[in-house]
Image (cartoon, rainbow, N blue to C red):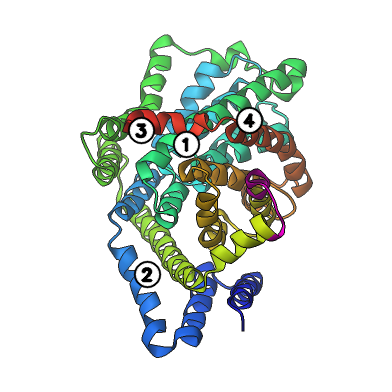
Amino acid sequence: MPYEMIATLMFSTMMLMLLTGQRVFGAIGFVAVVAALLLWGDKGGYDIGFSAAMKLMKWYPLLTLPMFIFMGYVLSESKIADDLYRMFHVWMGGLRGGLAIGTIGLMVLISAMNGLSVAGMAIGATIALPELLKRGYDKRMVTGVIQAGSSLGILVPPSVVLVLYAMIARQPVGQLWLAGIIPGLMMAAMFIAYIAIRCRLNPSLGPALSDEDRDMPRAEKMRLLRAGLLPLVIFAVMMVPFVNGWTSLVESSAIGALAAFVAAILKGRMTREVFENSVRNTLGITCMFMWIILAALAFGAVFDGLGAVKAIESLFTERLDLSPWMILILMQLSFILMGTFLDDTAMLVIVAPLYVPLVGALGFDLIWYGILYTITTQIAYMTPPFGYNLFLMRAMAPPEISLRDIYASITPFVLVMVLALTLVMAFPGLATWLPNLVYGQ
């Protein structure tokens, strides 16, 4: 059987197993191991899985994963993140749409503390959403705000998704994080501009808080400001030494986790329950990601051995005679299509063994492409009918918000994100300028 046919059979088998509801790492790893044994027998087949496991265990930056996840859960479980919203509520509630704008700011800061979109979604849906609805904000507007804002968690550093991309694409995590800062802040600014314009044109969508609601002694406002800025201090304590080269990436992640833990103790919120929940969630998510990376490495090794990447490159460039940019656009469209039924991690480990080498062969920068992938994943997360964020929001939203409301709420924000993706594609410097500046390239 031709190797191209074997690669196609592997890919289709894996997709079929995923559609039947199998766990991502189980489906990918099973296909990789069975294919390796059938192709190379007992001697070579066993080595592929073992080699992937050893490569994973030796990858030092992977230690950042549990550190950042623990930091995020400590800040969330200890309610330190809640102080952020109360600060935005008091200081920005006087603007039309001010609380919605403050919610985007909250999501950016939560992203900078956690690195996962799920944390932002949980905090936004449980803290911000009831407050916004209670104060007369349009339900479709605020539902879209929380979904769009929470998606920034996989782009703004310390993004866990970019750590996984770095592992599979063999790119420096620090450069990928720096590459995500400007596009992430740009997208947040575009969300804020959209909210401000919409609420100015139609004040009923986001009414300003009354003087009565904002009537508070100045001393209390300053106290809330100090409490809300604590997460920013933690982020600065973690990132400033790393950016200046004083600490390594792993050391900075440990500093961030320790700073969050100490902050929770000093505020009297580090209870036994908070600590147990944070550790348990950290362990569960870290193990899940490690199994997925292990399966992806084994799958990619088999694909490399088959020469599938070169076969696909030949198909696009020689047989179909497509330009590099057309191939890149088709890749992004395929991510959006897969995002209707897969999460970001599954998409990455399924197609990275194919796409990443092809992107490099076409002459594109892999750091820049990592940001394109991440933004496209954000869009896919919120694309009906099966976008990942849509169902998370449905599970967390109150009964008066229907699935139809959730679908309608996200359309304008998806269009804003498509515009942001187009800008990063047209101007690669938006992603590459900062890492080049810091690393002196």
Q: Which mark is residue 132?
A: 4
List the residue tagged with mark 3: 441
In magenta stretch: residue 53: no
- Along the polypeptide, which appears first: circle 4 or circle 1? 4
List the residue tagged with mark 2: 52
Residue at x-position 58% and y-position 56%: 343
- Along the polypeptide, which appears first: circle 1 or circle 2? 2
List the residue tagged with mark 1: 180
Give, as a three-letter code, the residue at label 3: Gln
Give, as a three-letter code, the residue at label 4: Leu
Image quarter hosting the N terminus: bottom right
**Dominant secondary structure, magenta:** helix
Q: Position of residue 43 (x, y in %)?
A: 37, 87
Residue at x-position 27% and y-position 55%: 60
Q: Position of residue 113 (x, y in %)?
A: 40, 39
| Dot 4 alpha-carbon crowd within 10 angstroms: few under 14, some 14 to 19, many 20 or more | many
Foreground residue among 377 and 67: 377
- Along the polypeptide, which appears first: circle 2 or circle 3? 2
CA gap, disc 4 to disc 1?
Answer: 29 Å
